[in-house]
Amino acid sequence: MTSTAATYDVRTAMPIRVELARQFRRRRTVVTYALLVLLPLIVVAAVKFGPQSSGSDSGRRFGGGSLDLVGLATSGAWNFTVTMLFFATGFLLVLVTAVFLGDTVASEAQWSTLRYLLAAPVPRRRLLWVKLVVGLLSTAGGLVLLIVTSYAVGWLAFGGGPLASPAGGSFSGPDAVWRVAVSAGFIFISLLFTAGIAFLMTVSTDAPLGAVGTALIIVIVSSILDAIEALGDLRQWLPTDYTNAWVGALQPQIDWSPMARGAALAFAAFVVLVGIAFLRFDRKDILS
């Protein structure tokens, strides 16, 4: 008779699909996705029923400036979608990423289930790998949910129409889809900086809120440093310096340079931080 140990394959331990289904049933996932759905609904309600919802056309504009993305929001579904990305990139999507990556291992330790998972037996690196992949998939799912919801809400509230570029011109059909897809792809890659910090913290503490909060604080501090002009060219080494580089996808000719630099910096930071997280977890004494 073949023993269980002989037929056990560590590569199939803790399947990603099982962990993904488990995470999607958690209350924090439902609440996080609900926030992403509520954002476009709240903005539409503010536009439709706010004190300046009637009157001159300027009263229906969200903002101004040389890059008036927000001012284009009410002109159609695509522009509304881009505006929601503009609103969410600075903090909401950072929070979503910190929650999905910072809560993943620390919550198991807090519930005292981590050592039982490792005793299943699930190899440490297999456990971390699955947790990392599920966290990134959950983050990507949130980004897609925001885009789809924003487009649907924008279409119902403001109708269709082409995607208007702040620099002039417009895009429709497949071209509009391509521009938004490029923007979303860069936003996801830029969020890897937050994901790496949160993932390192989740293997370093048994407090999920501590891991999430630390990741948020570091990103906020990086954003503050990026706003200090006295730092000069040093700011170009901060991943947060490229937070809005995705706007280059809305130019008549896509400006790839800042997106390429931002993506490379965020990905490099992610690889280093995740590598440290794996090494740290390999040596960690699991007591809970």
Image: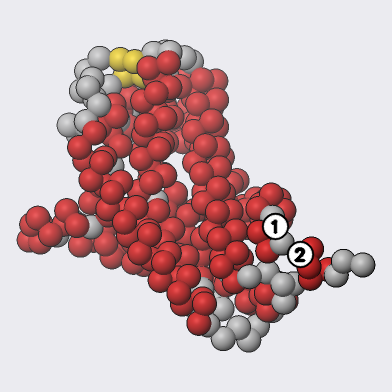
For the C terminus, the quadrant is bottom right
Marks counted in the figure total: 2
Kindly identify the residue that appears in the image at 38 percent across and 42 percent down.
187
> Helix, strand, or loop for circle 2?
loop
Q: Position of residue 159 (x, y in %)?
A: 48, 15
Q: Going by the image, does 211 lie left or right of 58? A: right
Q: Can residue 223 be seen in this view?
A: yes
* Kind of residue at badge 2: Tyr
Q: Going by the image, does 230 lie left or right of 26? A: left
**Can you tell which mark lies on residue 12?**
1
Coloured how?
secondary structure
Kindly identify the residue that appears in the image at 27 percent across and 22 percent down.
165
Q: Can residue 64 be seen in this view?
A: no
Q: Going by the image, does 196 lie left or right of 2? A: left
Kindly identify the residue that appears in the image at 54 percent across and 30 percent down.
148
The answer to which quarter of the image holds residue 224 is: bottom left
**Can you tell which mark lies on residue 128?**
none
* Kind of residue at badge 1: Thr
**Can you tell which mark lies on residue 8?**
2
